[in-house]
Amino acid sequence: MSDLHIFGIRHHGPGSARSLVQALTALQPDIVLVEGPPDADEIIPLLVEEEMEPPVALLVYRPDRPRRASYIPLALFSPEWQALRYAVRQGIPARFMDLPHARRFAELDELAEQEGGEMGEEGEKTAVSRSQQALQTLAQASGYGDYESWWNQVIEQRQAHDEDVFAAIFRVMSVLRNEADMLAMGTTPT
């Protein structure tokens, strides 16, 4: 069995897309897994047909409750788009990996029941907010006013073409998420 490689990217990040294609080309993987709804695996071949030109979007929804929906936008500079295209052009399998949206919708329904009303994506927004706060702390410690500026300068606009950036992103995000989770549970990170 070969090694697992995780490439941390920014959705719609042109620098991330460029670095990812270079890393995939060097790695020559047996399969490419892209963050996305596995309930949409069947449409990957349609999504990446040569005639299909971005911007495009996947729409995942509940047929019985069409307002319960998610859009997954893809642009030419999206790392996800580039990874899917790479896999198809190389003749290797590509799949989405994440929790199925059917499960996410069911979890939102459960939360809505508990809250006694319609629940949007607030639960997801809270988790994102904690990650953003952790990134904001990192950015400020690095001398940047906000995490968007830090990410753009350090990741998206960098000129180096090496795979070490993905290992560094993985390490940083692992530490930040662990600390954010600990703080959310009321525990002090070590």
Image (cartoon, grey):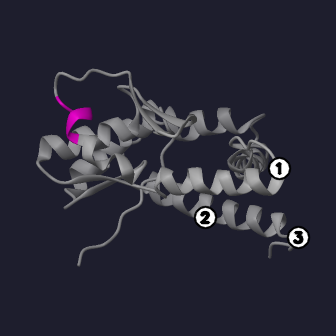
- Separation (CA) of disc 2 from disc 3: 18 Å
Residue for badge 2: 174
Indicate left or right for 73 with 154 as reference.
left
Q: Earlier in the sequence, mark 2 or mark 3?
A: 2
Q: Secondary structure at mark 1?
A: loop
Does the magenta portion include 51? no
- The spot of residue 168 in percent (x, y) is 52, 58
- Read off the magenta span: 45-49
**SS category of the residue bearing label 2:** helix
The residue furthest front is: 64
Q: Label 3 amino acid? A: Gly
Left/right placement of residue 43 relative to residue 118 reads: left
* Residue contact at pointers 2 and 3, CB within 8 angstroms: no
| Residue matched to label 1 | 116
Q: Quadrant of residue 144?
A: top right
Spot occupied by residue 150 in the image (x, y as percentages of width and height)? 65, 38
Q: Residue at x 44, y 39 (%)?
A: 16
Q: Nearer the viewer, mark 3 or mark 1?
A: 1
Mark 3 neighbour class, 10 Å CA radius: few under 14, some 14 to 19, many 20 or more: few
Mark 1 or mark 2, earlier in chain: 1
Of 48 and 69, the residue lying toward us: 69
